[in-house]
Image (cartoon, rainbow, N blue to C red):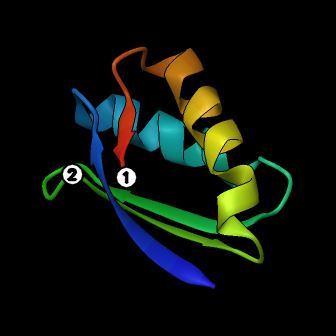
Amino acid sequence: MKKVFKIEVDCAVCAQKCEEAIKKVDGVKDCQINFMTQKMTLEADDIDAILKTVEKTAKKIEPDFEIEK
């Protein structure tokens, strides 16, 4: 299942680092973050179950990272 989320991330480098870290989270098949549009495309079997972990992982790199729900 693929889902697009509106996110908030402060810089392109942070967005890239967050994307790389999120791809390593168990259950995530793929993640793409577009800094210019402030959107994240997340692919996973059970997105709802891992969304909190994904946000927590990204916040370790970029404390201001937010997923708008």
Q: Residue furthest left?
A: 36
Q: Residues within 10 Å of mark 1 (few under 14, many from 20)?
A: few
Q: Which one is in front, 24 or 68?
A: 68
Q: Residues within 10 Å of mark 2 (few under 14, many from 20)?
A: some
**Could you tell whether 64 is left or right of 30 in the image?**
left
**Could you tell whether 52 is left or right of 65 in the image?**
right
Q: For the residues marked 1 and 2, what is the alpha-carbon distance in whole angstroms?
A: 13 Å
Is tag 1's residue or tag 2's residue first in the polypeptide sequence?
Answer: 2
Q: Contact (CB < 8 A) between labels 1 and 2?
A: no
- Secondary structure beneath dot 2 equals loop
The kind of residue tagged 2 is Gln
Q: Which image quadrant for residue 30?
A: bottom right
Q: Residue at x 45, y 63 (%)?
A: 32
- Secondary structure beneath dot 1 equals loop
The kind of residue tagged 1 is Lys
Q: Which one is in front, 28 or 46?
A: 46
Image: 25 above or below 2: above
Image: 50 above or below 61: below
Q: Residue furthest right?
A: 26
Image: 17 above or below 36: above
The residue indicated by pointer 2 is 38
Q: Residue at x 21, y 51 (%)?
A: 38
Name the quadrant of the N terminus: bottom right
- Give the total number of marks visible in the rendering: 2
The residue indicated by pointer 1 is 69
Residue 27 at x, y = what percent? 83, 62
Q: Which mark is residue 1?
A: none
Image: 5 above or below 44: above
Q: Nearer the viewer, mark 1 or mark 2?
A: 1
Q: Which one is in front, 4 or 29?
A: 4
Residue 23 at x, y = what percent? 68, 54
